Image (cartoon, rainbow, N blue to C red):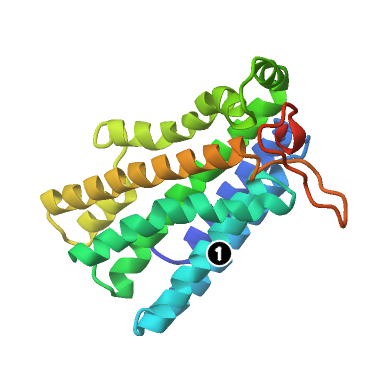
Amino acid sequence: MLPVNATLGAVLAVLLVTAAGVAALAHLTDARGRGYARPIAVAGLRAAVQLAAVSALIGWVVRAVPLLLCFLALMFTVAVRTAGRRVTENGTWWWTAVPIGAGVVPVVVVLLLTGLVPLKGIALVPVTGILIGGALTATVLAGRRALDELRTRHGEVEAGLALGLLDRDARLEIARPAASDALLPGLDQTRTVGLVTLPGAFVGMLLGGASPVLAGAVQLFVLVALMAVQAVAAAVVLELVARGRLHREPRAPGRTARRRRGSRTLDGAEGE
């Protein structure tokens, strides 16, 4: 579809510089005031290096099951680290492994047991990668939105505690709608597929010579599986935030966070 030559490299470089330049000129920043120009440039360069490495290794990895499992474990680890650091900067980031794993593992197991996806790298790696990517996105969006909402509306959480609600229930009432918005990108993509967008799996299979019917069936499977994975991931993240397992409270060295079940203060989950 695209020739791999100097022209492609030049166009990619121009697009990356344009993206970073627009972010810098528009002063696009996060909640902490950190600009997005540098992260965009770094992300583009990292993508080039990582894809080059994967392209070189994928043929070797898919030949043996042990290597395949190690590669899948690496994908999962990187996803957890990425999601965790996007949600919080303290030591609770590793809890993001739970929603990602809870969403992806059952779906992959079902696909293997039913034979829809064989235990071969050429099939398992792309399918698992798509599912892990979807779970990562839902985890980040749900976690960040839930914790932002708790921080902004902490007074309402305290009001719920004053009325007799437990910590978990008070936080759920505030964080649930915000965390649920993490499902919107996947939902909109599924609702508009074929009308607004033609996703990668569909286009890739067509370019590979598959029939439109087969390409459509595979794409439908990917979209439905993604909705299932993202729904589970968002629900688990919400529960972790409500229980205070995943939060933004800084921890002093040598001190563990104190949690009291049924406490009437925001304690470590404010934002918490």
- Image position, residue 85 (x, y; %): 67, 51
Query: In percent of the image, x 51 and y 24: which residue is there?
Result: 177
Left-right relation of 170 to 132 = right
**Res. 144 image quadrant:** top right
Q: Can residue 2 be seen?
A: no
What residue do we see at 37% from left, 61% from top? 128
Count of numbered circles in the view: 1
- Residue shown at the point (43%, 66%) measured from the top left: 4
Which quadrant holds the N terminus? bottom left
Callout 1 secondary element: helix
Instruction: Say left or right for 194 vs 33.
Output: left
For badge 1, the amino acid type reads Thr
Left or right of 271 in this view: 94: left
Q: Residues within 10 Å of mark 1 (few under 14, many from 20)?
A: some
Q: Is residue 180 visible?
A: yes
Outermost residue toward the right? 253
Q: Position of residue 233 (x, y in %)?
A: 46, 45
State the residue in front, 193 or 40: 193
Q: Look at the picture and state if 24 lies above or below 221.
A: above
Residue carrying label 1 = 77
Q: Foreground residue, 115 or 198?
A: 115
In this picture, is 126 found above or below 149?
Answer: below
Above or below — where is 74 with respect to 166?
below
Quadrant showing the C terminus: top right
Horizontal and vertical percent position of residue 218:
21, 52
Q: Nearer the viewer, residue 140 or 56?
A: 140
